[in-house]
Amino acid sequence: MAQKQNGFTLIEIAIVLVIIGLLLGGVLKGQELIQSARVRNLISQQDGLKAAYFGFLDRFRAVPGDYNQANPNIANVAATSNGNNNGRIEASGAGGGAIDEHIAVWEHLSKAGFINGSYTYAAGNETTTTAATNPYARYLRLIYDTAYGTGTPAARHNLKTGNQVPSDILAEIDRKIDDGNPVGGTFQFSLYDGGGGNGTAPTPANCYTATAWNAATVEPNCGGASLF
């Protein structure tokens, strides 16, 4: 009498393994595409804002946020949003400034037509109506300071990405637009906590080691800064 066969044949097992391989490949490819899209998004945002900064500078011969004639020369900007025109975007009290110019910068740029959206200056912490955000819902910051890289760098204007950006994303951005070094070049590590009064500052040791971003062991709370 013929015996009943139990289990799977080699062909059936091979088919199952091929299907599993295709599914895993699709998942990994999907993750790669998502990461690439996030990298492109952040690079595009940084490039667009740098272009807006220099476009404003070219048109008004003044730095956005710091411009002391924003009220008479840009529609719908109040006199209380004028900077002190010392050539630096600074926080209130720094350099003799009366307002937080790093927040006023968003109103100046948006109402002058250099960036999308409409922002209105208000003193205090950043909000969604006063400042732009990154793809991770943390606030960007364009300011003149030394809070980038490591040690005691020279003060200069820089555009901070905001925090909550994974270290592997920043590693890819740095490789694409700069030298891959988080403490050198024109794109560096940033301690900025993302603003809004409720952020957690990135920890340097978790985000990079020596001269390389932590890409293998990913730290979710990191940030970078593009230097001008």
Image: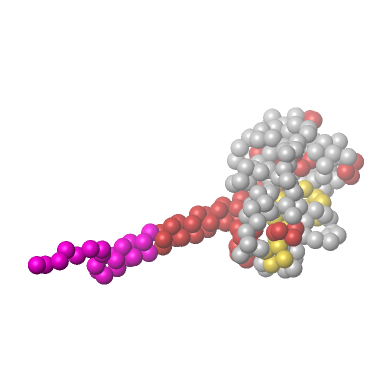
- In screen coordinates, is 103 left or right of 169? right
- Looking at the rendering, the stretch of residues picked out in magenta corresponds to 1-23
Residue at 79 percent of width and 40 percent of height: 101
Q: Is residue 198 above or below residue 159?
A: above
Of the 4 image quadrants, the one containing the C terminus is: bottom right
Q: Is residue 103 above or below residue 156?
A: above
Q: Position of residue 112 (x, y in %)?
A: 67, 39
Magenta portion: prevailing SS class:
helix
Q: Is residue 122 above or below residue 44?
A: above
- Quarter of image, res 109: top right
Residue at 68 percent of width and 54 percent of height: 222
Question: Count of labels shown?
Answer: 0
Q: Position of residue 143 (x, y in %)?
A: 77, 48
In the rendered image, residue 16 lying in the magenta stretch gets the answer yes
Residue at 72 percent of width and 68 percent of height: 211
Pick the front one: 189 or 98: 189
Q: Position of residue 185 (x, y in %)?
A: 73, 65
State the residue lying farthest toward the front: 1
Q: Position of residue 131 (x, y in %)?
A: 69, 39
Pick the front one: 136 or 177: 136
- Quarter of image, res 47: bottom right
Residue at 23 percent of width and 63 percent of height: 6
Res 57 seen here: no
In the rendered image, residue 13 lying in the magenta stretch gets the answer yes
Of the 4 image quadrants, the one containing the N terminus is: bottom left
